[in-house]
Image: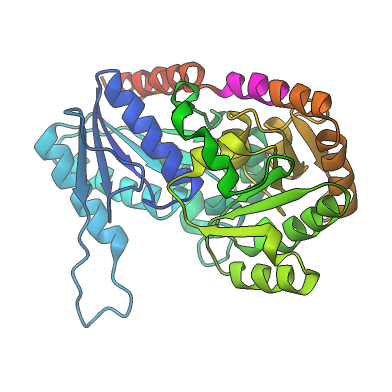
Amino acid sequence: MKIAIVCYPTFGGSGVVATELGLELARRGHEIHFITYSQPVRLALLNPNVHYHEVNVPEYPLFHFQPYELALSSKLVDMVKLYKIELLHVHYAIPHAYAGYMAKQMLKDEGINLPMITTLHGTDITLVGNHPFYKTAVTFSINKSDFVTSVSQSLKEDTLKLFNIKNEIQVIPNFIELDKNTIDPSISCRRSVMATENERIITHISNFRKVKRIPDVIKIFYKIQQEIPAKLMMVGDGPEKEKAEYLCQELGILDRVIFFGNSNEIDKILSYTDLFLLPSETESFGLAALEAMAWSVPVISSNSGGLPEVNFDGISGYLSDTGNTDEMAENALKILKDSKTLNKFKENALSVAKQFDIEKILPLYEELYHKAINKFL
C-alpha cells in the first residue's frame, strides 16, 4: 500500500506513535510518505520505502497567522497525484483531519477517491478540540473521516461525550517496539553517572506542562528520598521546568535531582530506572508509562484517563487519585524498599508491556487500511 501519514513532528506522544507506525509499515514493504512542516524527530530516512515531504507555508503580509491548513491540504493533493498515494492517515483531528477532508474534496473533483483515517490522541479532543472556537470544526472533521480510531477506551468515551459524533470509533491502543530495547553491555557502568550503587533511580519524562503535575513528581520524590537513598531523573522540557527547579531548591533536594531537558538517551535512562512517576491530571493513554514498562520499570501514576488501561494497579505499579501524593509516595516505597518486591514488579511491568507490542497492534491498522481502501473500489 502507498500511505500518506500526517502528524506533528515533535517529541510529543502522537508524533512518536505516528512515526514509529510509519517506519514499521515501511519495514513490512508499504510505501510511506510523511507530510508535515518539519522532519519528525524519530524519523529515519535510510529506508527506500520512507519518504518525507515538507509543507512550506509562504509568508504573506495579508495574513496575521499563516494558513497552515491551506498549505497542508494543497501539499496533500500534490503528493497524492504525484506518488499515486492510496490512503491518508492523519493523527490529530485538528488541523490534520480538517485539512485532509479539504484535500479529499479537491481530489474528488479530479475523479480520485482518497480514503482518510483519523486517529485521535487526546489533546485534540479533551483540551483544544472542546474549545467553542474549534468544536464545530472538530465534530465536522471526525464525522467526515472514513474511519476513526482512538488510542484508548477512555478517549473514545470522552469524544462521544464532548462531540456529536456519528462515526464509529475503533480503539487501537498505542504500542511499543520491544525488540528495540537492548543496550550495549559495555556501557552499563554509566549508571554511576546518575546514582551510586545503593541509590534507587526514579524517573519522570514529559513535556513539563501543567497537566503533568510536575510539582507532584517533586513532592512524591521528596517523601521517597526521606526513607531510602534515591535520585530523581527529570527528562523533558516545558513551561513548568523552571518552577520545578525552584521547588527542588526550596526542599533542599536539588543535589538529588538531575534535569536533562529533551534527551536522545531516554532508553539508556530507562534501562537504569527503578521506578517511573506519572501523576498527571489526565492522560489519553500514557505512552510514557508504557515506554518505561517496556524497560521493566514499574509505574506510580494517577488513575485518570487511559492510564488504568496501561498501568495495572498492584501488578505493573499502582494507581492513585490525582493529587494524592501521600498515597503515591507510600506505594512507591512499597515497591522500592524490598529488592524482591521491586524485581517482581519489574517482571510484571514487562509482562504487561508485551500486550502492547507493535507486532500485536500493527495488524489492527493494516486490517483497517485494507478496509478503507476497499471502501472505494
Residue 136 pos. (x, y %): 51, 58
Occupied quadrant, residue 31: top left
Residue 357 pos. (x, y %): 52, 21
Bounds of the magenta segment: 348-356
Q: Please determine whether, in this image, residue 81 is positioned above or below residue 140.
A: above
Residue 311 pos. (x, y %): 71, 32
Magenta portion: prevailing SS class:
helix
Q: Is residue 256 magenta?
A: no
Name the colouring of the figure.
rainbow
In this rendering, does residue 17 appear at all? yes
Instruction: State left or right for residue 262 relative to residue 251.
Output: left
Occupied quadrant, residue 173: top right
Q: Residue at x 51, y 28 (%)?
A: 176
Q: Depth check: 30 or 90 in front?
A: 30
In this rendering, does residue 324 appear at all? no
Q: Looking at the figure, which quarter contains the N terminus?
A: top left
Q: Residue at x 61, y 24 (%)?
A: 353
Q: Depth check: 39 or 334 in front?
A: 334
